[in-house]
Image: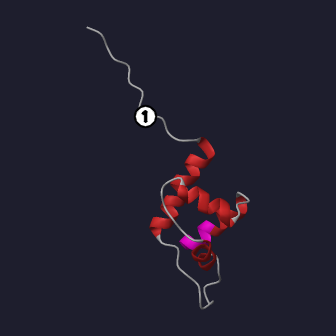
């Protein structure tokens, strides 16, 4: 299974539109255009097909976590008094 397949399956399972995927990627400061995204979702034999790289998929998954759970707060530490 390729990164393209994983991204396609997540898009279908989560009912995401292209605009939402672009917004999710923007949450982690990763920019992708709608046409680049369209090329990733094409069939492999299409002349404008583009392979989804590890970096794009990784950033999408990180952005998806923020999208679904919200931003991570800083680590909470309890200071111990002497």
Q: What residue span does the magenta drawing correspond to? A: 1-7
When asked about the image quadrant of residue 36, the answer is: bottom right
Give coordinates of residue 42: x percent, y percent.
Answer: 65, 81
For this rendering, which residue is in front, 29 or 66?
29
Position above or below: 52 against 72: below
Q: Which residue is mark 1?
A: 74
Magenta region includes residue 6: yes
Which quarter of the picture shows residue 10? Answer: bottom right
Whether residue 12 is visible, yes or no, is yes
Q: Residue at coordinates 43% horizontally, 34% vertically from top-left?
A: 74
- Residue drawn at x 58%, y 84% is 49
The quadrant the N terminus occupies is bottom right
Q: Is residue 71 above or below residue 28?
A: above
Residue drawn at x 60%, y 73% is: 37
Residue 1 can be seen, yes or no? no
User: Would you say residue 37 sits in the magenta stretch?
Assistant: no
Residue 82 point in image, percent of width and height: 25, 8
Q: Is residue 45 left or right of residue 57?
A: right
Q: Is residue 39 above or below residue 62?
A: below
Q: Secondary structure at mark 1?
A: loop
Instruction: Give the crowd class for mark 1: few <14, some 14-19, many >=20 residues within 10 Å.
Output: few
What percent of the width, then of the height, locates residue 15? 74, 59
The secondary structure that dominates the magenta segment is helix
User: For this rendering, which residue is in front, 33 or 15?
Assistant: 33
Is 59 on the left or on the right of 70, as rendered?
A: left
The correct choice, above or below, for 32 with respect to 72 in the image is below
Image coordinates of residue 73 in percent, x first then y, are 48, 35
Question: Which residue is pictured at 58% across the width and 73% down the height?
Answer: 4
């Amino acid at each position: 299974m390729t990164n393209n397949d994983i991204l396609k399956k997540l898009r279908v399972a989560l009912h995401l539109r292209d605009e939402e995927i672009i917004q999710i990627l923007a949450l982690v400061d990763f920019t992708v255009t709608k046409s680049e995204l369209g090329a990733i979702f094409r069939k492999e034999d299409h002349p404008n097909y583009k392979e989804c790289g590890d970096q794009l998929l990784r950033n999408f998954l990180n952005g998806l976590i923020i999208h679904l759970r919200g931003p991570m707060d800083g680590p909470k530490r309890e200071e111990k008094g002497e």
